[in-house]
Amino acid sequence: MEIQLFTISVFTENQVSLLHQISMVFSRRCLNIESLSVSACSIPGVHKFTITCKSSREMMEHVVKQIEKRVDVLKAFLHTDDEIVFQEVALYKVPTESVLKSSEIEDIVRKSGARVLEIQPEYTVFEKTGHTVEVKDLFDRLKPLGLRQFVRSGRIAVTKAPIELVDEFLQKQEIRKQLQNGKEDF
Amino acid sequence: MSNKISGSEILIRALIDQGTDIVFGYPGGQIMPVYDRLYDFTDRLHHYLARHEQGAIHAAEGFARATGKTGVVIATSGPGAMNLITGLNDALMDSTPIVAITGQVQSSLLGKDAFQESDVVSTTLPVTKWAIQVRRPEDVAPAVARAFYIANSGRPGPVVIDLAKDAQSGMAEYIYHPCTFIRSYDPDPVVPEEIIDKAVELLDKAERPLILSGHGVTIAKAEESLIALAEKGDIPVGCTMLGLSSIPTDHPLNKGMLGMHGNLGPNINTNKADVILAVGMRFDDRVTGDTSKYAPNAKIIHIDIDSSEFDKVIKSDLHIHGNAATVLGKLAAKVKKNSRKNWNDSFERHKKVEDERVKDREINPSTPDGKMLMGEVINKVSQAFNNDAILVTDVGQNQMFSVRYFGFTKPRSVISSGGLGTMGFGLPASIGAKIGVPERNVVLFIGDGGFQMTIEELGMIMEYNVGVKIVLLNNNFLGNVRQWQHLFFNSRYSATPMVNPDFKTLASAYGIAARDVTHRDELEDAIKEMVSTDKAFLLNVNIDETDMVFPMTPGGHGVDEILLNATEYYKPV
């Protein structure tokens, strides 16, 4: 069974315990989450989790179904890299002294397309957005030149589909609500 | 201002407005405001005091399984809530609607390791369908409405409402609307007609179709549609353990039980069938055996209300996401009337072998010392109740023999811990079932091991005069583990012999009539005595410990690789 990196997008109600409900689907199967990014999405009241995980497609399809089964989860989607546009952001802190000592850091930063976020007498912070390998490449280059701190975000991603996939789902639910004359009292 | 009542009273009024009249529970410090209000509502909300929270929740499960209503259990914080975990997991595995209400320390103390504080929501999330903590009295009624809606719709399951003390004591107005819609949750998906038509086409074309009827048929009250479909298409039915009472035992199309200790016919013919219609079942490993050898000749149609079950264990050729009653009703209306005599007859020769080689020696044995076999006892008790009692089992050999040799004529008649296999489930579940359906006979078969796991619930029987019939199949062994030790661990009986108390004396301490049956000669008379009373009765039956459940598909084997006894595999001719 082929192991590859998958990206899972999960849209949920904005409520306590959702992270636990999602993570337990992974931990139950001893699956390691590679990266995780959570924030409010463009729809008011809806949160989006973007999770990456290395596993087989079969396993990931089960995981997505079991995440979606949780009552407060609206919809979950499974993506491979070719189906999404994705990005990470990373911050790099180096001593300002090292930057000034030679043009080496400046050259590396220019070529990598990173930008300067803050310059202080003691330290300078660069920001780099890109894919994991690009972020890692800049890290590898700056490390021997006195990198003091490094942090990177989880992956964020949008699909290549023309619409937000969860919109379609929400529209269907609105129709269902009207058909059932449903009362949601919470 | 004057319209305001306490969160505790809101809880009780909401339970009543939701149609609850029976709750099981156990009080404690952090749930005292609720119990205090309960004191004023005892005419409308009957509280049954268990002797342990695990007993309370298993009783609520038995109540829910027997009635189809939501079982309600109340426990205090900390240890009270933690003692519910086994029951919650059991209810999740067996799709049993439960609303569990737990007390919680006041919200200002949360996260500070207060006395009897447990992180109930986090702990119960993996074993529940939904769990919520309520901290404000105005949130109590909506939480109850949502809890009942979730627990008993779609695929039913347990939910937890963790009620902080301030939510119980604080005041709010009481406004109650039952919940009927949650946008993230669709419990009754619409089934497109074209999918029904595809299934009908597969069934009509099939020469050797087989219906696998699971617990979902009972939950959806789809028994009539199931039988209508089977009869119209002349399609044989195999039942999972929890689906057993979905079709009467003596119905000519009921070919028996599937799985590890099921009947030869449906197991062998699973691998002969060309179309399998699996409904409300989830291809548990106890049903399929080795999945790579399962149903190699069949197109599989899988009907389930839970879409995460599709392709989880067995890949289906067509899945139908919907309510079993709706889907089976549509299929029954659309399939062609058919006759499949040869296919149905093909089950008979397997049945004949099983009757001669397995069943007969089990129900008509002749052990020289008079010790009895479980099968003969179960068969006789079932007949004494005209095969129309509710069967409750514990877990182990008592369970496997019970579901093999007990007869069913009415739906919703088998209550057993299927998915989780919880020893100690049986006694409290039988009490809950009898409380839920007092007009029916409730018979519990239980082993000496499982009996002692929740034996404290004899107290409930005593206090509430619950007329359950307890048949203790007592072999002074943990029989099922012993069987596996005998077959697969070189007969090394590690930690399975039991030194037991005098159960008859124990029962008499609780005022429960009891009788020891040491020899076969006394059995029929003892059963008569048990049947003749409306009150609870304990039959302590002296069982031969060497008896083993057969047929048996050992773990890792295909569904048609079946042991007839300890050494001989079945070879169909």
Image (tube, coloured by chain):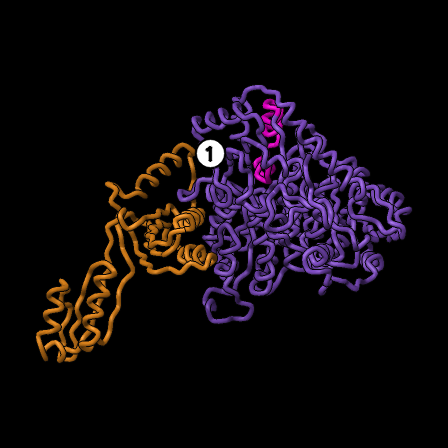
Identify the residue shown where x is 72% and y is 46%. Answer: B568
Name chain B's colour.
purple
Closer to us: B547 or B464:
B547
* Residue B229 in view, yes or no: yes
- The kind of residue tagged 1 is Leu
Write down the residue under mark 1.
B318
Q: Residue furthest right?
A: B521
Identify the residue shown where x is 13% and y is 69%. Answer: A108
Image quarter of residue B504: bottom right
Closer to us: A138 or A166:
A138
Identify the residue shown where x is 30% and y is 41%. Answer: A167
Q: Position of residue B1 (x, y in %)?
A: 46, 53
Q: Position of B553 compared to A100: left or right?
A: right
Q: Position of B404 compared to B313: left or right?
A: right
Magenta stretch: dominant secondary structure: helix
Q: Position of residue B552 (x, y in %)?
A: 68, 46
Q: Element type at marker 1?
A: strand
Name chain A's colour.
orange
Q: Position of residue A185 (x, y in %)?
A: 43, 45
Identify the residue shown where x is 34% and y is 60%. Answer: A34
Q: Position of residue B516 (x, y in %)?
A: 86, 53
* Residue A72 in view, yes or no: no
Asked if residue B217 is among those painted magenta in the image, a careful observer would answer yes
Asked if residue B207 is among those painted magenta in the image, a careful observer would answer no
- The residue range painted magenta reads B212-234
Closer to us: A78 or A67:
A78
Vertical side of A105 occupied by B85: above or below: above
